Amino acid sequence: MINFDKPQIWFTNGPATSTDEVLAKCIKAGATAVRTCFSYKTPDVHVARAHQVQTVAASCGSPVAVIADLQGEKCRLGSFGSLDALAVKEGENFWLTSGDTDTSTSPIRVPLQDARFISKFEIDDVIVEGDGGLLLRVTSTSANHIVVQPLMDGILHPGRGIVVQNERHRPSAFTEKDRADLDAVLASQAFDAIALSFVGDQSDITHVREHMDRVGRHLPIVAKIETALGVKNIREIARATDMVMVARGDLAITMPWIDLYASTRTIAKACSQEQKPWILATQIAEGLERFTFPTRAEICDLAHWIEQGAAGAMVSYETAFGPKPVEAISFMRAT
């Protein structure tokens, strides 16, 4: 179980923290929970990682919680064939299509992994690729493709997620993949909580609890707030869930970035009113990739939100792929 009597320091497991040695250093540095991201790899891999974390934590004499982060509905670009990336130019239309890649003709055709998303786009929608590296405007739609116009020069990457930047955007929080992943999580008895992506209202929490009722095993739910709809309904979400995560990665690209601070304050206030713990996530200490300590902005950011009532924070890139995972956790503990 997650012990909220002490500040929470969560980190994301990944290639940078895959060995027993690094995991032990992270745990000894003060980590209280480890997140495994079901957006990648198979459930068997995550169950094995959960058991690994438990074994290493036991050897350190410092038990940590293991959190299964379910993917939710994610729209991703498909394969580009032999290309690892594709340059696009501002104002030069190309297609997002249900078909195959074709970069030899004009307009260029780029596939989506799941063709069902084609019908969800509307003219003038602004699409954000990745973490905001490229913005695309939808100029026309059809049954098997949409035409998009880059709003800047940029690079497309196969497998990257794309989202629509408006309040209508509501990915499903509990897909068939999530159901299968949750079944594996519950059967393994290796996890202490689940994180639910793209929570839009309390019904998302209810559906997951009902599924766990049918399985006959329950875990606490961390509701990840990543859309404007989630912010709008945060009071009812906080009331229904066990804890909340301000997942600033998607939250900052599914709404105008200028609204991120006010949205975080809204979430913090609702959690306080409902007496539910909340966790701050995304870009906590990414300055460590370039510098010997986090940036001044990161230092002030984390300290501010802890003062505003955050139960703790979670790092993602910093420990999944970053060069200094142990230092990231040490910074959080010091703050």
Image (cartoon, rainbow, N blue to C red):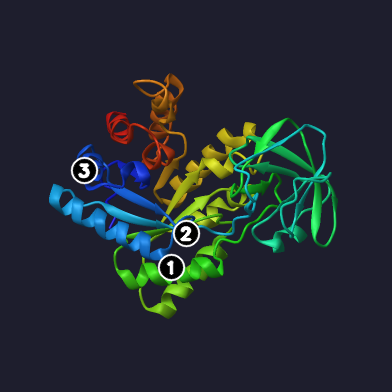
Distance CA(mark 3)–CA(mark 1): 29 Å
Question: Left or right: 188 with respect to 310?
Answer: left
Query: Would you say the residues marked 2 and 1 are in contact, meaning their CB atoms lie under 8 Å apart?
Result: yes
Amino acid at dot 2: Leu
Question: What residue is shown at x 37% (from left), y 78% (from top)?
Answer: 216
| Residue 218 visible here | no
Going 54% across and 52% down the picture, which residue do you hit?
A: 235
Relative to 274, 328 lies left or right: left
Q: CA distance from mark 2 to mark 3?
A: 26 Å
- Which is closer to the viewer, label 3 or label 1? 3
Q: Secondary structure at mark 1?
A: helix
Residue 261: name its quadrant.
top right
Task: Mark 1: give few (<14), some (14-19) or many (20+) Cα within 10 Å.
Answer: many
Of the pair 91 and 28, the residue shown nearer to us: 91
Residue 53 in the image: state x and y as whole percent. 25, 53
Instruction: Tell me the element at label 3.
Output: helix
Residue 85 higher or lower than 35, as above or below: above
Q: 145 or 13, which is in the foreground?
A: 145
Q: Is residue 97 left or right of residue 256?
A: right
- Cα–Cα span, label 2 and label 1: 8 Å
Q: Which residue is mark 3?
A: 21
Residue 182, label in figure: 1
| Residue drawn at the location 44% of the way across and 45% of the way down | 272
Amino acid tagged 1: Leu
Query: How many other residues sit within 10 Å of disc 2, few (<14), some (14-19) or many (≥20)?
Result: many
**Badge 2 or badge 3: first in the primary sequence:** 3
Q: Residue under circle 2?
A: 70
Numbered disc 2: secondary structure:
loop
Q: Earlier in the sequence, mark 3 or mark 1?
A: 3
Q: Indicate the position of residue 62 as horizontal and vertical percent values.
A: 17, 48
Q: Residues within 10 Å of mark 3 (few under 14, many from 20)?
A: few
- Which quadrant: the C terminus? top left
